[in-house]
Image (cartoon, rainbow, N blue to C red):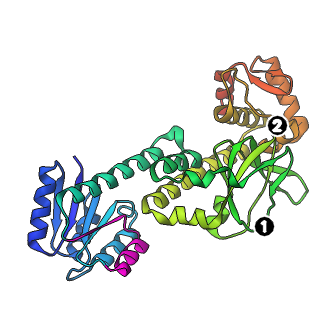
């Protein structure tokens, strides 16, 4: 049963609204002013908050400001109630992060529709984050497009084809757009002081590039270039920022996904830093296969041995020697330049630091 907190200083409105929602199957908690409401919201566990604007002790804007600063309550859908319909009130509430507005007096249908819509969107967005197998930004943005009609973000009007080895952006440049990969694969890399390339990430169809620099308002920390022919869509900065700031649920979930991706990246770098050569090569092959592999156990990358070595952080000669060992041990085979995983169990065991 969904729990709703209703913050309203008018006793008649508070009791009548709570009664309607209880009859509709919601578990209700009420508060007679903003201060009490904020305290209950932080202590409780609610799926949605409905709050009047003009109240004693603390007005609705103050309540929303407090809840937005608390990680526990910042993502709870928030609907304002107001007897005023001036445009300035709507704008102020939305700028603070309100999800919807209801102008008093409102009818029962209007109230129920607003609540059901907000709860439905919240459930769908939270579901994309909770699925461990769907932890990429692409999956989240795909869900956002379906839920909030942002399909125009990846329209064909800004599509460009990058040939293999073409540079998309360089380290130190400032971003003017967010990039979406329609097809192909792109590597993100940095060059060491000794001129050696280290590949920090490989991205493919459905993923986004350049989002961290846009969010931080900083320059790119790596170079992006195509490792095979790739079609990319550029999304103007203004549209990306509008997407992030238009809905509190979107921004909160986007941050959660970014945090998860950073943790995943740190785990990969730690493994590469402390594993021996065999473990590192096995880890990278297993990582690439899990992300891009197909039903033939092909890791699915048109990547050179030099680039694979750069992704592993070892010399090319060491990579080739280790791949040869894996081939003789029956773990992999070659299909032209493609690497085919023959024994996924052995590969995974090696990647996790085990022995075969």
Residue 118 point in image, percent of width and height:
33, 55
Residue ID at (41%, 69%):
97
Q: Secondary structure at mark 2?
A: loop
* Quarter holding residue 38: bottom left
Residue sitting nearer the eye, 150 or 350: 150
Tell me what residue is drawn at x 59 percent, y 47 percent. Answer: 138
Circle 1 packing at 10 Å, graded few (<14), some (14-19), many (20+), is some
Pinpoint residue 134: horizontal percent, then vertical percent.
53, 41
In whole angstroms, how far apart are the C-alphas of marks 2 and 1? 25 Å
Query: Is residue 353 visible to the viewer in this orientation of the structure?
Result: no
Going by the image, does 33 lie left or right of 166?
Answer: left
Give the residue at mark 2.
303
Q: Which residues are magenta?
A: 86-104
**Is 95 part of what is drawn in magenta?**
yes
Could you say which quadrant of the image residue 78 lies in? Answer: bottom left
Vertical arrangement, residue 100 with respect to residue 234, above or below: below
Picture disc at residue 67: none
Query: Which label's residue is closer to the chain start, 2 or 1?
Result: 1
Tell whether position 40 is magenta.
no
Q: Which residue is mark 1?
A: 173
Which corner quadrant holds the C terminus?
Answer: top right
| Residue 116 visible in this rendered orientation of the protein | yes
- The x, y position of residue 73, in whole percent, is 35, 63
In this view, the residue in front, 128 or 342, is 128
Q: Image quarter for residue 236?
A: bottom right
Does 115 sit above or below residue 218?
A: above
Percent x, y for residue 227?
A: 81, 43
Q: Using residue 312 as the reference point, say whether residue 296 is left or right of it.
A: left
């Amino acid at each position: 049963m969904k729990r709703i907190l209703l913050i309203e200083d008018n006793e008649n409105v508070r009791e009548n609204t709570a009664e309607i929602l209880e009859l509709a199957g919601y578990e209700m908690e009420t508060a007679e002013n903003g201060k009490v409401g904020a305290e209950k919201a932080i202590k409780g566990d609610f799926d949605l908050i409905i709050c009047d604007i003009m109240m004693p002790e603390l007005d609705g804007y103050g309540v929303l400001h407090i809840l937005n600063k608390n990680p526990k309550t910042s993502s709870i859908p928030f609907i304002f109630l107001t007897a005023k319909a001036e445009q300035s009130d709507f704008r102020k509430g939305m700028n603070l992060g309100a999800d919807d507005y209801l102008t008093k007096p409102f009818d029962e249908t209007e109230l129920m529709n607003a609540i059901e819509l907000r709860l439905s969107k919240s459930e769908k967005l939270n579901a994309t984050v909770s699925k461990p197998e769907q932890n990429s930004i692409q999956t989240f943005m795909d869900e956002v497009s379906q839920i909030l009609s942002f399909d125009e973000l990846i329209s064909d009007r800004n599509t460009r084809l990058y040939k293999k080895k073409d540079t998309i952006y360089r380290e130190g440049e400032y971003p003017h757009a967010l990039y979406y990969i329609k097809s192909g694969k792109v590597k993100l890399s940095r060059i060491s002081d000794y001129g050696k390339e280290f590949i920090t990430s490989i991205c493919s169809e459905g993923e986004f590039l350049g989002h961290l620099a846009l969010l931080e308002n900083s320059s790119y920390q790596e170079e992006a270039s195509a490792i095979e022919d790739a079609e990319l869509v550029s999304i103007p900065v203004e549209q990306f920022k509008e997407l992030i700031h238009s809905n509190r649920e979107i921004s909160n979930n986007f941050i959660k996904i970014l945090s998860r991706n950073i943790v995943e990246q740190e785990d990969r770098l730690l493994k590469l830093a402390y594993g021996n050569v065999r473990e590192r090569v096995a880890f990278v092959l297993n990582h690439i296969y899990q992300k891009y592999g197909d039903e033939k156990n092909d890791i699915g990358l048109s990547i050179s041995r030099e680039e694979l070595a750069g992704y592993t952080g070892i010399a090319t000669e060491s990579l080739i020697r280790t791949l040869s060992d894996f081939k003789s041990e029956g773990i992999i085979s070659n299909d032209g330049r493609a690497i085919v995983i023959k024994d996924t169990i052995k590969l995974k065991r090696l990647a996790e630091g085990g022995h075969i």
